[in-house]
Image (cartoon, helix red, strand yellow):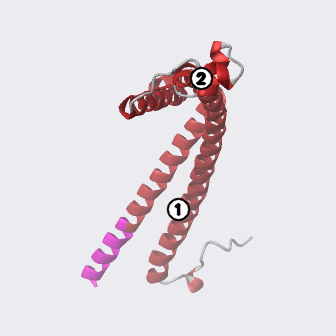
Amino acid sequence: MQRAHLPTPPQSPSARQLSIEPINNSLALLNNLTAFYQQERYWTHHTRAALESALASTVKGTITLSADSDDADSRSSSSPRSSPSALSSVAGFSDDSDYASIKAEPLSPKLKSMDLQQRRRNRKKSNLRLKLGGITPPIIKQQGSRPSQRILEMFAELVESRMESCERVTNMVKRYHRDRDMQMQRVV
């Protein structure tokens, strides 16, 4: 039984072929592994982004509901002074003739802008609190995260470390063969 991968003396490759082929085979294999791990890294990033967008959409739905209720609260608390219809509905007046007998104090432009700024600030503050509630520090995230998220993080770490390892080995192989070729050229 003859083995095809072991050369026999009459068909032995030259020294130059021996030095070139192993590096090409090694580098091709390492490049394929690196490409595979890059695809896996892309998949983990894509999956993580999908999970985060799903989480953000649920948080955004919560923010939208709370912002709507905040708007309703701010309208009911601050707009009776500025809108006659709101004043009449709050005070129990049904027509404009009843409203005409009550003189509303006009707000100065400065007070109106301050009131508007205060409402905006409160709305931003509550939205920020909700957004920050969805974002947790990394330490808490690792401890309290769901198992599926933790598995995804572990897989991403594994892929990253293996890809770095392939890159290091590729550099070592290239450096070894470069140094070896330089030494062989010095000898010749």
Residue 182 in magenta? Answer: yes
Determine if residue 62 is in view.
yes
Q: Residues within 10 Å of mark 1 (few under 14, many from 20)?
A: many
Q: Which residue is mark 2?
A: 100
Point out the residue furthest to the top here: 92
Instruction: Look at label 1 and name its amino acid.
Output: Leu
Where residue 60 sits: x, y (%)? 62, 34
What residue range appears in magenta? 175-188
Q: CA distance from mark 2 to mark 1?
A: 85 Å
Quadrant position of residue 139:
top left
In depth, the one of 134 and 187 nearer the eye is 134
In depth, the one of 120 and 76 nearer the eye is 76
Q: Which residue is mark 1?
A: 30
Disc 2 is placed on an element classified as helix
Please tell me which residue is depicted at 44% across the width and 82% down the height of the picture. 16
Q: Quadrant of the N terminus?
A: bottom right
Please tell me which residue is depicted at 59% across the width and 29% down the height of the picture. 67
Q: Is the stretch drawn in magenta largely helix, strand or loop?
A: helix
Quadrant position of residue 110:
top left
Q: Residues within 10 Å of mark 2 (few under 14, many from 20)?
A: few
Please tell me which residue is depicted at 56% across the width and 81% down the height of the picture. 9
